[in-house]
Each structure stands twice: as C-alpha cells, then as structure tokens.
Image (cartoon, rainbow, N blue to C red):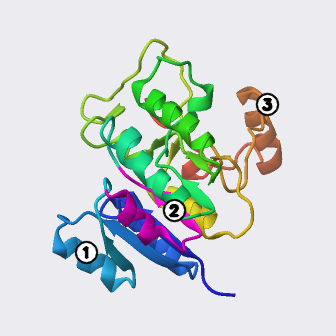
Amino acid sequence: MSAPLVVVAGTTGGLAKLIVQDLIKRGAKVKAIIRPQTDPARIEILRSLGVEIASVGLPDLPGLTNELTGATCVVSALQGLTDIKPVAQGNLLDAAVAANVSRFIPSDFSPDFTKAKAGSNGNLDLRRDLRSRLDNSGISLTSIFIGGFMDLLGGDSPILNNKSRKVSYIEQTITLLDFTSMVDTAACTAAVASDPNPAPEFLRIAGKVEGTIYKPYWMGPIGFMIRALQLLRGQDQLMPAAEKSPKL
C-alpha cells in the first residue's frame, strides 16, 4: 500500500511545522503549499525534512487544484482572521473539492464553537461561518477542538501573569478552561490526516488527561493520628525530622 499524500498549507508557522514532522514520522508523503514570496531559508528547512514544495498563491485556484490532485487529505494551518479564514482557506477548500481530495482539516484548533453562542466570540463566529460552507462542500471534514494553546498561559498576553501574580478573567471568576500543547495538537492532527479510516466530524482532544487518577483519602482528625502513632511507635520514640511540625 502506497503512502498517503497529505498537503499542508501554512507550513511556515510553528504548528504546521510540527504537523509536517509528525506526518513524516507516520510514513506519509507531505507536500507544502508555499506562497511565492516565502523566505527561501524557511523553504530549505522544509525541504531538508523531505517535504515536497509547491510554490503557489492561495488566490490561484487552478494552480492550487493542480497541486492538490492526488492528495488524500489537505490540512489547513493558515493563520489570520477575516483575510485568511473565509477567503484563503475558502480557496483551499474549493481547490480540494475540485481535486477530489477525500478529507479536509480546517484551521480551527480552537474551543468548541458548536457550543458557543453566536456573536459571543468573533474568532469562533468566523470558524462557524466557514464550517457552514465546508458542510455544503461534500468533502469529509474534521474540525479539531483543543480549547486554547498552552502558550496562552504565558507570552505576550498571558492569562497567568507571573509578575503581578494575577489571573485574568472575564465576567465569572470561576470558569473552566481547556488547554492543549502545540505538540499534542500536531500529533493528533497528523494521526487524523494520515489515517485511511473514516474520521470523526469533530475531534475534541482538550481535557483528555493521561496517567493514573488519584483520589483524596481522609485518614482521620489530627488528634486521632497523633494517638495512633504513639501507640504504634511508643510514646517515648522521637518522630523523624520530616514528620515534626514546622516552627511558626
């Protein structure tokens, strides 16, 4: 069985580079859609990974269609708002449909906009509007919901401000927020893009905690515990340093 061909758009971004690397690890052939004005140094980085380079502008629908022909999946990692989400990504979708690509992964990577009220978040509204266009395209779609990237917890606009030791919030002080690392997002995206089996329409990977879950266990009041230790060790036996109460 030949390796699947996955075309990735927006490959000069951090997330897209990770997606490309994970696709290659999974044995997929990867083609990168690169704008003609892209920095040659960035192109060489991709080429060194074994990525096929396709230099074509996103407004060039015939050129895009030609480059997408033969692909099993198109992954959009395009960044931007009104000039990218509806227009550039829309052109990428139209080209994927014209090239008979079986699967399209839009550049959602966001909180679950299906559960958000219309008008409450402009970014989610853009994704929702594009989703309605995607649904009518006839192509198999998988939107990946991650909550927010973990770098939102730091960086230029942090939710957690380590300097002032404050947590930013809007309206309610108790709000559940999901976060996913960019590395995990890329790994899940590559898994869906390279899988020949049908994929879910919505892949919700935020909030999936790995590892063994521990539960609190109440051992009793402090007076009971002191008495129990005295009975077990003897009242004259000194407690180890680690068990002594700290001085206040």
Badge 2 is on which residue? Answer: 74
Element under label 3? loop
Residue 185, compared with residue 123, is above or below; it is: below
**N-terminal-most mark, 2 or 3:** 2
The answer to whether residue 2 shows anywhere in this view is yes
Please report the bounds of the magenta region as a residue range: 60-78
**N-terminal-most mark, 1 or 2:** 1
Badge 3 is on which residue? Answer: 220
Residue plotted at (47% across, 27% down) = 125
Residue farthest top in this picture = 171
Instruction: Give the amino acid at mark 1.
Output: Ile
Which of the 4 image quarters holds residue 58? bottom left
**N-terminal-most mark, 1 or 3:** 1
Pick the quarter of the image with the C terminus: top left
Real-space CA distance between mark 1 and mark 2, rounded to the nearest whole angstrom: 19 Å
Residue 212 numbered mark, or none: none
Residue farthest bottom in this picture = 1
Residue 53 part of the magenta-drawn span: no
Residue 43 numbered mark, or none: 1
